[in-house]
Amino acid sequence: MKDDRKERRVIFEVDVSVNWRMHEKWPAVLFLLTSVMTFHVRGDSGAFVGINIGTHVSSLPPASDVVSMLKQYEFTHVRLYDANAQLLKAFANSSTEVMVGVTNEEVLKIGKSPSAAAAWVNKNVVLYTPATNITAIAVGSEVLTSIPNAARVLIRAMKYLHKALVAANLNLQIKVSTPQSMDVILTSFPPSTATFNSSLNSTIYQLLQFLKKTNSYYMLNVYPYHGYIKGNGNFPLDYALFQPLSINRQIVDPNTLLHYNNMFDAMLDATYHSIKALNFSDIPIVVTESGWPWSDGADEPYATKQNAEIYVNNLISRVLNGSGPPSEPTKPVNTYIYELFSEDQKPEPMSQKNWGVLSTKGSAIYRLSSLSSRVAGSSSVVYCVAKDGADPGKLQNGLNWACGQGGANCSAIQPGQPCFLPDNIVNHASYAYNDYYQKMQLNGGTCNFDGTATLTNTNPSRGSCVYTGSVNPSGGNGASPPTPSLTLGPSSDFLPPSSSSKLDARQFHFLSSPMLLSAFFLLLT
């Protein structure tokens, strides 16, 4: 099998220099890809979106207020990083399912003593049940990569805690697991060849044995934000943000021919394949953390409110459609958003302090829909907006073209009109781009505008400024690719002469390295 895989990789060790959009053979390539494509069904079991609650927060509101805020946004599952007594009491007699955390410092103590584990369970679990619906214990956080010296006691700590739950007759109600980062996997692309770091195999094997025996699940922290930053330009931002990708921009696993139109699903499948590589199956994954920072330091230009809003709302829609990643389409991806409040008392970098979706007063940092409105398929409504950080000159050219030759109705962005404020080029271009796209997409119009526009599932409407949305045939599933369109529409070729009307030919040198190989499947438009 390994020799066969190596042979397949060698096939792709080529140099390519081509203008992909104008290549005359590209329609044939699209036809070939779609003819072998695997489509996936949605899972029937109800997936949930929960949220993490950290307490390194200035002016943390009273626990009762926190519970009220969660009800307002209809979060019914929460994860606590420790066993905060005030919050555990506040969740009593509610329907909220609570995951409590053993801190990394506590892991070292519990892993050395069964009596310490029993004392922890009695103090932080038994004391609050059954009034508080505790359903899981997260033992540490990314222990194997953050404090490697604790690896030797991690599994023992989990076993001791589970035995304490058995003694309290709570083992069937409460699962025990430990959140891991993607860093325990050496190379995550292609997903089908992903494996755990061999130096951790012994510990991870024991972990998987424990999870299988206790019918628990693998806890995984998934951060496409970090994956995009580390990708050094190998992936488009849209891929990290769950933004709709055309068929020629999706990433394909060369071994399975599965298509990935978002990084979240690719990370999940890399983990599933890593688990299978150790000969385990039927261990589901629960995503214990995933989010996007909304404020940045000087070196973090992609940590913006716009990107955070897009990511979190698209994540919610992705999870609630009930499907799994391409290799495990029937396994829902229960996910906890990181996080409720920004933990401003955390150390640098700046973006570590700005992940919260709500202020401590309860107002949303950015547009955040209640979960009941994010039903399966809601992600099929799309809007065309200007990309955050796009070149202002290109945006101005796109705005001029849309309001002129493109035929968009731009009256709403004139002074005194509903969509004039905020008075900036991104806002005005977004409205014009969307108006053009909604009118012309059925006639071949696209959302491109010299690379300054992107599709989003997040409704950009605000107050009396209303954007028209349309149905995306891909359904926002995250597994099945959209039907390819060979019509260019209002691409860069249709913009005014001052804009670049052609894409530069890109030359890629493909080696057997999985990261470089991924560039072959990422056909940038």
Image: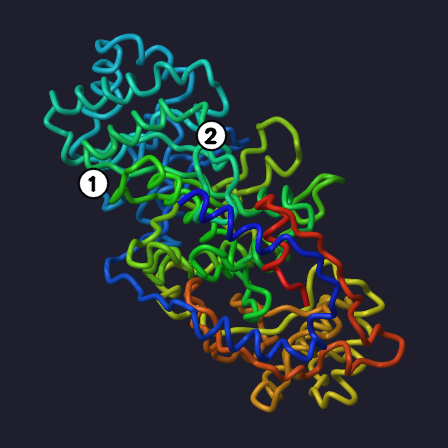
Q: Which residue is mark 1?
A: 93
The answer to which of 338 and 157 lies nearer the viewer is 157
Amino acid, disc 2 = Asn
Q: Position of residue 217 (x, y in %)?
A: 28, 39
Quarter of the figure with the N terminus: top left
Quarter of the figure with the C terminus: bottom right
Q: Is residue 100 left or right of residue 402?
A: left
The answer to which of 48 and 220 lies nearer the viewer is 220
**Residue at screen point 47% across, 32% down:** 184
* Residue at the limit of the structure toward the right, as seen here: 498
Nearer to us: label 1 or label 2? 2
Secondary-structure class at tag 2? loop
Q: Which residue is mark 2?
A: 197
Residue 294 visible in rendering = no
Quarter assignment of residue 279: top left
Q: Position of residue 268 (x, y in %)?
A: 42, 47
Q: Is residue 415 left or right of residue 189?
A: right
Q: Position of residue 320 (x, y in %)?
A: 36, 59
Q: What colouring style does the render use?
A: rainbow
Counting labels gives 2
**Residue at screen point 59% across, 59% down:** 521
The answer to which of 87 and 230 lies nearer the viewer is 230
Relative to 7, residue 278 above or below? above
User: How far is disc 1 from disc 2 in space, using C-alphas?
Assistant: 43 Å
Secondary-structure class at tag 1? loop
Amino acid, disc 1 = Asn
Pointer 1: residues within 10 angstroms few (<14), some, or many (20+)?
A: few
Q: Is residue 157 left or right of residue 517?
A: left
